[in-house]
Image: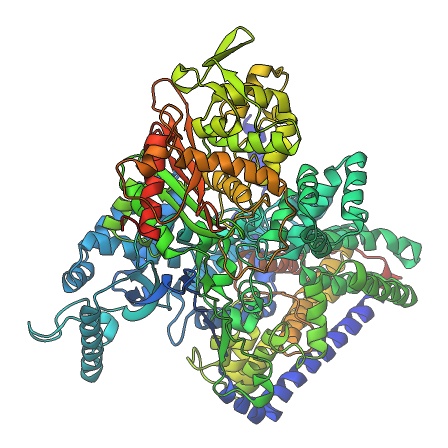
Amino acid sequence: MFRFRVHVLSALLIAAFGLVLGRLAQLQLVRHEVYLAARAHQTRPQVEARAPKRGSILDRDGQVLAADVPSFDLAVRADKLPFERVTLNEIRDARRQARNPDELARAFSALEARLAGEAWTRSLAARIGRAPEELAQGLLRALDRVARGWERATTPVPFASGIDAAVWNALRAAQEDAFFAQAAQGVPAAASVAAPVREETASPYFAGLSCLTSVRRAYPHGTFLAHVLGTLGELHPDQLEQLRARGVLLDRLEDRERIWSETLGAWPAEHRRQAAGLLGTDPATLSVPALLAVLRGLDDPGRRAARALGLGDALRWSDAPPRVALGEAERFWLGEELTQSLRRTAPAALPDTRIGESGVEAWHNQLLRGESGLSFRLDGLEESQRALHRDIAPRQGSNLRLTISSAWQRAAEEALASQSHPGAVVVLDCRSGEVLALASGPSFDPNLFAPPREGAPRQAALKALLEDARLPLLNRASAGQYPLGSVMKALVAAAALELGQLDPHAGLSCPGHVDEGGRRFHCDGRRPHGLVDLDQALRRSCNVYFYRLGAQVGAEALGRFAYAVGLGRRTELDLPGEAGGAYPDAAWRARHLPGQSWSRGKDFLTAIGQGYVSATPLQAAALMACLANGGRPVTPRLWADAPAEAPAAPVFSARTAALVRQGLDEAVNVGTPGAMGTAYKAFHQGVAPLPVRVAGKTGTADVTDEQPPHAWFAGYAPAHALQVAFCVFVEHGGHGGEVAAPLAYRMLRTVYGGGR
Amino acid sequence: MNQVWQTTTHRAAPVSARWLEHLVRLDWFLLGCVALIVALGTAFIASAGGSGASIGWGLLLRHCAYVALGLAAFAAVQRVDYLVLLRWSPVLYVVLLGLLVAVLFTRPINGARSWFNLYVVNLQPSELMKPVLVLAVAHYLMYRESYKRLSGLLIPLGLFLVPMALILRQPDLGTAMVLVPIAFAMLYAAGAKKTDLALVNLAGIAGMVGMWYWVMKPYQQRRILAWLDPEQYRHHEAWQLLQSEIAIGSGGLWGTGWSSAHANAQRFLPEKHTDFIFAVIAEEGGFLMAGLLLLLFLLLALAGLRIARRVREPAGRLIAVGVSVLIAGQALINAGVALGLLPTTGLTLPLVSYGGSSLISSFLCLGLLANVGAKQEVVLAGEDFR
């Protein structure tokens, strides 16, 4: 029985092997010719990514502010380098063995020194007129990319850029000549290590060196508008996942869906009911695209409510496009879609890895960047196979036209540069909110950041920038928040008038101080102003008048107006890193000062823009724009071609705005002795008169006793025509009327001309 | 004292003599087949590991090291009476099950949790499970008659199904599937009724259909679809399959020559030194070499089954059947995949493919087989004397 069954098994095995042998014979003997022909036709389809051209950034008149320019680069093929094997393995070892960044840095600088000592590096450095150390640094970074699998050893990886065109051309020609000369002699090209071919005069051949051209971001005007333009950086392949995790890179809908469902899951029932009321439908039934569509349709109070509900993230998605949204070709490139047949030839990195890091380069990155395309090299493939490999054309990046007016911007930057303190200037179109100038000083040169960032001088400059105590990288105009000082008084006056709590002509006696809660609150300079009405109070910046007015209106009621015109919240400018400032209404106090009681004295301080009030220069300019245009709040924006928004509903009546404007006008233009406007001197004493009438409010915001106060001057011009609103801010500059107002004069004179 | 000393020396036969006896009784035909297969495989590993016309010395050296380890394992098994191993087989089985569970908690390598990373070598417990499973099933079936009933098949089938399920979790469809022919062959040889086995077979097919829907990952489904319709999937799942077929087909009778730079497999075939080594051999060695290799596997299996017929000890002969079918079955499946007869599974060609765990496991299995064949004791098995 057992033996019989084993016989059966043997027979089965023989039959199975027979079958397989038969199939082998069928393939190898019968259909041999067919497969031979198929093999002859085999070419591995080659895929190449086609980088999109990054769009330029223009000012409102079409002048180029940032653009890609050609760059002459040197690249290295790691597999052809005379010292490739050692170095790649050593880099991998260094990465593996280093236990902390310090060790890694040490190992890398040792490697760098080794590379700098190679004959190849030294003679190349001499050839292009750079230090071998600088070249070695770039070389090491390029090889590191290969060692980490971001690039293939067989593709040239750039390691030095911005080579002088003549030197580059000569080098390329010499490389080709030497290569062909060696090929003709039958000397394997890889064997020659930067050794002269025959005589001293012959150029050395650098094995593995390729001369490539690429593009580099250039900012032709240097530090001009640097904080708005922002900087470009490089996206490394392993940063993609990190960016996705941080929500910066929301190329995948499922990531948004995940965040949305997490948000929903964390909501209490009450919250959900409120959201249902706000959105008009149960939020749980909304997909993310539907949610964003609903949010886009919200009005301002709606947006405020949505933010209060914790929909801030989603609001931001609905406003700004994600920083990077990968196109079809790029998803294909990076993702699962890359077919097995292509994966081996495709380099690991995206073709254009530059990504905006700050400024509009970051905010409008997607618009500027475009999308990569793919093209296939299909030599020798049959028609049916070609059809499977559809080229995807790259979508070129669009040009970004800004609302910035170079004339205003230049005037603003010159004014700032005319003094030594850090500061900021913002100029807005007071009807549309378009930003005509946004300057922050001190500034920096964004060209320093444009990748590639190799090279010791560049690194040193960047380090100096980052370590500068004056914080040149901080955009003080929209990301710096400072106590607003007396500029706030314009808002307090408008709010009180709007609420009907103020008779503008009623006088109030100012004794120079007022006592409240055991503390004495002074007027500026501690001198009594005597009997003041609204015009006088704004003109002479009487604190006592506004102490009383602020306490009468109350911080809470004032807060509603503050929020409406853009204080205490971000103005939604399309620039990353905007600060929201602070306004101490009940919600803010609950968050930041839990358990502390509120007092009349704090109302006093709030009314003169001290205490807990802080704002960005941008917000002060937006406040002035609102008063200048008759009471409509503006949303500042930088993108000239942004889809038009419906104008906001007025916050103040025309009468209110006109009454406040009268006071602001007097602050600049009334020079009655003894009751002079706080900014009168800056515009009228000892200076040429401007062709336009200016109105505005000075501010002097005390910070600490040791340092001089911040100087503000916010206003608009011309006083009787709707044109621009502006804000000049000087950090620890001193008195607003003495420091900030003259800068404003200087700027306005540059633009409007003056001194006939 | 003196007395005892004398007695013990007297009783023990000299160790070298026992070795010699064992060596003489080994099935040298079987071992000859093994030696030829390993030699042939090593030659083509050297070719597949290189790039272009150069030899992959690193790969070749490591392969030789694994072969040496395998031979050591083979020799070690010869030193132990397989009946002792049989007694320990339940313990070994449980330990291996534990390892199969533990491996599911490791970090995946190439998308599967099949390996323990021991730095020098990646240990693949599913490979070691093969010889232990054969031992354990033989141990269970040794003196029983219960498997002649349908219900009695449940436990031996369970012995197969538990590791299969764990291996499927890794996921490693190929290694799990290669256990199926062993199960059927051992149960059939042990005397299970054909009708019962047919029923189990039906249940198995039903289970496969269930697996398609609940267990298999989309990529595994696509592999099967690609096998059914290669044109449709030619740039994705069927890429390997088509490249393998082109490589084999263009080999012809004589082959393109050892380590030929323009061979198709060298340029276009991923996994050419592991799962698709057969395509390399068939392309470079032609029908002669590939056919010879298949023939050697068949002869090896037949020699194994001859041992099964000759041995009268009930567990030993089951071990012989199990090992023979394991080696032959795995070779058949691997060649079948390369030839486009079966869907891609990711299974090695035993004794040939590069890979430590696979080689050592194969040598352990063959060690058991040789050990069984060389055993002299004649234990009376029931049936043939009835």
The quarter of the picture where residue A155 lies is: bottom left
Q: Can residue A481 be seen in this view?
A: yes
Q: Which residue is drawn at 67% across and 69% down?
A: B328
Q: Is residue A484 visible?
A: no
Location of residue B322 by image quarter:
bottom right
Q: Does B303 sit left or right of A376 as displayed?
A: right
- Say left or right for B247 vs A724: right
Asked if residue A525 lies left or right of residue B361, the reply is left
Give percent across and percent down for residue A587: 65, 28
Give the camera-side residue of A500 and A715: A500
Q: Is residue A344 positioned above or below A519 on the image?
A: below
Which quadrant of the structure image shows residue A352? bottom left
Which residue is found at the position 74% from the left and 73% from the top? A10
On the image, the x and y values in percent for residue A717 come to 43, 46
Q: B165 above or below A671?
A: below
Is B11 or B244 nearer to us in this picture? Answer: B244
